[in-house]
Structures are given as structure tokens and as C-alpha cells.
Image: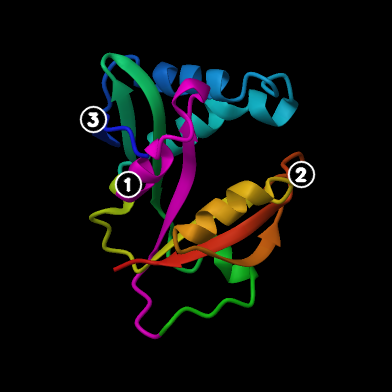
């Protein structure tokens, strides 16, 4: 069952006051059981890294005034896409890759279809022909969920020395 929620769109270059803090607070609640881990402590850096881009796109779900989750990302520079480290070959006419950097929902709102709703809303009007995301390989249920959304695992990578090993997952758009 999907809970109907209010989804708001945000774009780089026009983010409201307190936006980054809202994302950091949702992350802290979503990862409260492992927030002490060093890699999770770096989340504010990732928020700055992505949200400072002009082509940054974010959708945030609200239940009333309460933020329940978000999804964000941005297009990757041509030739620098994460999947290029794999054996994956896109179909002819490759027009670009959109990186889904984060999809998260706070615990009280999980298992209601909100993550899928956020993901679909984030990708709804993209011009790129591929979407790519990373999933911690120790979370096979999450990887399986993304497979039900049309992604396929095309390889693995560790983007930072202190990061988990991730499955590289790709989905065709359009």
C-alpha cells in the first residue's frame, strides 16, 4: 500500500533556508542505529557536494509539515559515469546518466511505498537515458527492491577508501 503524501521539488541554485539541515536531520533519523559510523558522519559533506551543483534535483516527501524522506541526485559528467568501471555497455544513442545519490525514508514512514514514489518523482522528467545508483552489498533486500524498480547490478565499486563496497546498479529511462 502506498501512502499519499505531499512531494515537493527543489533544484540547485534556489534552495530555501534550512534545506540542507532538513536533509541532515532526516538522514540522522533514518540511520540512527549506525549514525556513529565514520562514513555516516560524512553525510553533511555529501549534502554540500550534491546540493551546491546547479543541476542538483531533490524531491522531499512531507506528511503535513513533517519531512518523511527524500531522493536526490544530478546528471553525471559525460565519460565520468560510475558504470564505466564495469562491463556494462549502454544501448546506442547514450544521451547521459542521472546519478541517484540518495533515497531515504524515516522509519515511521517505511514500507508505505514512499521510497518508490520519491524515486519515480525524481526521475519523472529526466532527459538522460540511464539512471545509476549504488547499493551497499551487505543490503541484499535493498538491492532486490531496486531490481523490482527496473535496475540491474552491473558491477561493484568502493568510491571512497572508507566507504562500503557498493553494487553499481543501472536502469534505462524513457
To which residue does mark 2 refer?
161
Q: Where is residue 102 in the image (x, y as percent from the top left)?
A: 49, 40
To which residue does mark 1 refer?
122
Residue 60, by quadrant, is: top left
Chain part drawn in magenta: 92-120
In this rendering, the answer to whether 155 lies above or below 158 is below
Please state which of residues 10 and 170 is positioned toward the viewer in this rendering: 170
Of mark 1 and mark 3, the one earlier in the sequence is 3
In this rendering, the answer to whether 26 lies above or below 39 is above
In this rendering, the answer to whether 149 lies above or below 173 is above
Of mark 3 and mark 2, the one earlier in the sequence is 3
Look at the numbered disc 3 and give the secondary structure of its residue: loop
Q: What residue is drawn where x is 63% and y is 48%? A: 141
Q: Distance between the residues labelled 1 and 3?
A: 17 Å
Q: What residue is drawn where x is 26% and y is 21%? A: 16
Look at the numbered disc 2 and give the secondary structure of its residue: loop
Residue 116 is left or right of residue 59, and the answer is right
Q: Does the magenta stretch include residue 97?
A: yes
For the residues labelled 1 and 2, say whether their Cβ atoms are less than 8 Å apart.
no
To which residue does mark 3 refer?
14
Q: What residue is drawn where x is 68% and y is 21%? A: 33
Residue 162 is left or right of residue 7, and the answer is right
Of mark 1 and mark 2, the one earlier in the sequence is 1
Residue 153 is left or right of residue 16, and the answer is right
Look at the numbered disc 1 and give the secondary structure of its residue: helix
Q: Please rate how many residues cluster around mark 2, counting C-alpha atoms within 10 Å: few if below 14, some from 14 to 19, many from 20.
A: few
- Give the residue furthest to the bottom: 92
Residue 164 is left or right of residue 92, and the answer is right
Amino acid at each position: 500500500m502506498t501512502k499519499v503524501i505531499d512531494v515537493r521539488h527543489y533544484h540547485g541554485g534556489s534552495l530555501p533556508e534550512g534545506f540542507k539541515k532538513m536533509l541532515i536531520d532526516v538522514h540522522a533519523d533514518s540511520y540512527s542505529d549506525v549514525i556513529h559510523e565514520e562514513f555516516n558522519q560524512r553525510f553533511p559533506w555529501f549534502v554540500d557536494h550534491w546540493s551546491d551543483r546547479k543541476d542538483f534535483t531533490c524531491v522531499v516527501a512531507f506528511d503535513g509539515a513533517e519531512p518523511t524522506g527524500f531522493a536526490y541526485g544530478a546528471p553525471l559528467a559525460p565519460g565520468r559515469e560510475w558504470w564505466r568501471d564495469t562491463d556494462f555497455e549502454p544501448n546506442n544513442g547514450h544521451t547521459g546518466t542521472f546519478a541517484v545519490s540518495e533515497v531515504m525514508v524515516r522509519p515511521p514512514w517505511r514500507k508505505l511505498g514512499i521510497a518508490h514514489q520519491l524515486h519515480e518523482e525524481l526521475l519523472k522528467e529526466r532527459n538522460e537515458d540511464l539512471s545509476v545508483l549504488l547499493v551497499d552489498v551487505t543490503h541484499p533486500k535493498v538491492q532486490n527492491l531496486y531490481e523490482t524498480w527496473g535496475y540491474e547490478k552491473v558491477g561493484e565499486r568502493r568510491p571512497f577508501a572508507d566507504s562500503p563496497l557498493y553494487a553499481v546498479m543501472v536502469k534505462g529511462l524513457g
